[in-house]
Image (cartoon, rainbow, N blue to C red):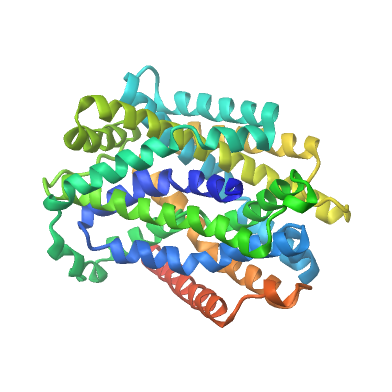
Amino acid sequence: MWGPGLIFSGAAIGTSHLVQSTRAGAIFGAALITVILLINVLKYPAYRFGVDFANARGRSLLTGYRELGLWAPILFLVAVAPVVPITFAALGAATAGIISAIIGPVMPVPALAALVLMAATAMLVIGGYRWLDRVNSVLMAFLVASTLATTSMVLPEVQWMSFVDVSWTREASALLFIVALAGFMPNPLDVSVPVSLWEVEASRSLPPEKRPTLSQARSSFAGPYALSAIMAVCFCIMGAGVMHAQQITPLTDAPGFAGQIVDLYRQALGPGAAILAAIAALSVMATTVIAAIDAYARIYSSAMSVFAGREDDCGQRQDYIGFALLFMAMGLMVLFTVMSDFATFLDFTTSAAFVIAPVVALLNHLVVTRCDLPDEARPGPVAKGINLAAILVMSGLAVMYFVLSF
């Protein structure tokens, strides 16, 4: 059962990969490949802790936060809330950009992005988790295959000497971009909570004898997670092999940059495959939007159940629908009032998501080390060590972000 893991992967192979990883390669060549891999390694334990807790307890991380004390879920919800509407706006704009690249500029990006958000919300309100699980698999295989093929074809064009170039570490703008790259790489770290909720709901849909063991749940998440990391590196190589090698500057508007991504496929695979790859990319971005709306509506509806002390902490349907509509409306407000330059707005959004990441990693660490869990579900010294290192690194980068920005 790879359902929750595939939903995570489908959500990940979106803005962080199609946009940020490609920009990383276009701007810095192969220099940030190691950074991308390191980000994925450091963030992994905090995500897996959500899988572990959900599998062992049949409850979400929010229940674990509540067991730490009322302060923990409140801190999490307050930290995440400001990021939700700008995340929706950024994802909607990126998806609108790909639509414009495929069929042309049929309407302004904010209006098209608004339609994307409304359509995704309507799909979830009508279909819920089962639709999300099914939509997530559409065209994913083709995008992976076409991206791997494109990557292999541009490998000779990559300036591999840039792999060992560390001159970017002395540039303030480059360090700020690292924070923006890390924010959604592979997903915002607060997605560890919906990962636990997806795991709980997926397990509850199975008869008891078919529910996954802890080892199976971990493997089901690790496979798609590794796939998302590999895809992130592939998009970075594509950006390095085509855009950086030809000194093509990434465009700052959503349709323009989406067109550049389509051109990566066109140059390597030809026009026919490029169109199919673009459609697959659109499908993946649409899945990312759907997964994000589901994730945050699920977080806050689940919080209502946790605060009310209900046995079922997955949230009630009316709360889920209410929060989905609320956050969609807030995302629409951001689209039409705040967003002007797409690249700058996206960097701000992903950086904001990264700033709260150390808080989430710490809360998840406390849950799996202090809450009631069987011994086999508690992290070993390696997982704990990596997560503590991640907390320190992310905290340092967050401080650096504020110092360099303000």
Which residue is depicted at the point 24% across and 71% down?
170
Q: Using the image as rendered, state which of residue 385 and residue 338 is in the foreground.
A: 385
Which residue is depicted at the point 31% across and 38% down?
146
The residue lying furthest to the top in this view is 106
Q: Position of residue 161 (x, y in %)?
A: 13, 65
Q: Tell me the quarter of the image containing the C terminus.
A: bottom left
Q: Position of residue 381 (x, y in %)?
A: 57, 82
Q: Using the image as rendered, state which of residue 380 and residue 312 is in the foreground.
A: 380
Which image quadrant for residue 79? bottom right
Which residue is depicted at the point 47% across and 29% down?
113
Q: How many marks?
A: 0
- In this rendering, position of residue 99 left or right of residue 135: left
Q: Position of residue 288 (x, y in %)?
A: 50, 40
Q: Is residue 101 above or below residue 188?
A: above
For the question of whether residue 174 can be seen, the reply is yes
The residue lying furthest to the front in this view is 209
For the question of whether residue 330 can be seen, the reply is no
Which image quadrant for residue 396? bottom left
- In this rendering, position of residue 342 left or right of residue 54: left
Q: Is residue 264 above or below residue 110?
A: below
Q: Is residue 239 above or below residue 355?
A: above
- In this rendering, position of residue 293 left or right of residue 403: right
Which image quadrant for residue 140? top left
Q: Using the image as rendered, state which of residue 270 and residue 192 is in the foreground.
A: 270
Q: Position of residue 124 (x, y in %)?
A: 65, 31
